[in-house]
Image (tube, rainbow, N blue to C red):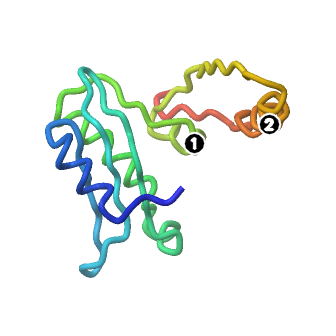
Amino acid sequence: MQLSKTYFSDVIKTQSDLFYVNAWFLNNEIVSFASGFYLTNEIEAHYVGFDYKKNKEFELYQTILYGYIEEAITKKKSKINLGRTASEIKTTVGAKAHELLCYIKPQNAVSKLILKPFMQFLQPTEWIPRNPFK
């Protein structure tokens, strides 16, 4: 799915007290960004983006994760929801996996046929949990 060019500005206009975007720059060029929502006691990670070519050298994704932690501390939030992708690297900053439940009820034979391969796609990949606080 591709976002519209005005997606972030539209969200900021309608949710300015709940939504934020942080960006990181190198030589005056943006190399990564992270967005999120402030909820009652937590931060909900939203869209992130980074220059994959520079990620290895500058650890951009790791910096994004630390950015979420810094934002939660600054805003006195007790929890961060980082989403369900890249689980292994998220555990390096102390994230813990939680079971995600999803209920889908097919309405007809066609949706049943489509649902089976779709459910296979939703299965989590195997990963090794890390614990930086041993």
Q: Residue at x 46, y 29 (%)?
A: 133
Secondary element at tag 1: loop
Q: Nearer the viewer, residue 55 or 22?
A: 22
Compared with residue 115, is residue 13 higher up or lower down, i.e. above or below?
below
Estimate the x, y position of residue 117 in percent, counting from the top left.
82, 38
Q: Closer to the camera: disc 1 or disc 2?
A: 2
- The residue pinned by badge 2 equals 114
Compared with residue 78, is residue 125 higher up or lower down, i.e. above or below?
below
**Pointer 1 or 2: first along the chain:** 1
Q: Residue at x 68, y 36 (%)?
A: 128
What type is the residue that disc 1 sits on? Thr
Compared with residue 83, is residue 61 higher up or lower down, i.e. above or below?
below
Question: Quick one: quadrant of the N terminus?
Answer: bottom right
From the viewer's perspective, tell me whether residue 101 is left or right of residue 67: right
Estimate the x, y position of residue 22 in percent, counting from the top left.
26, 55
Estimate the x, y position of residue 64 in percent, counting from the top left.
38, 52
Q: Nearer the viewer, residue 83 or 27?
A: 83
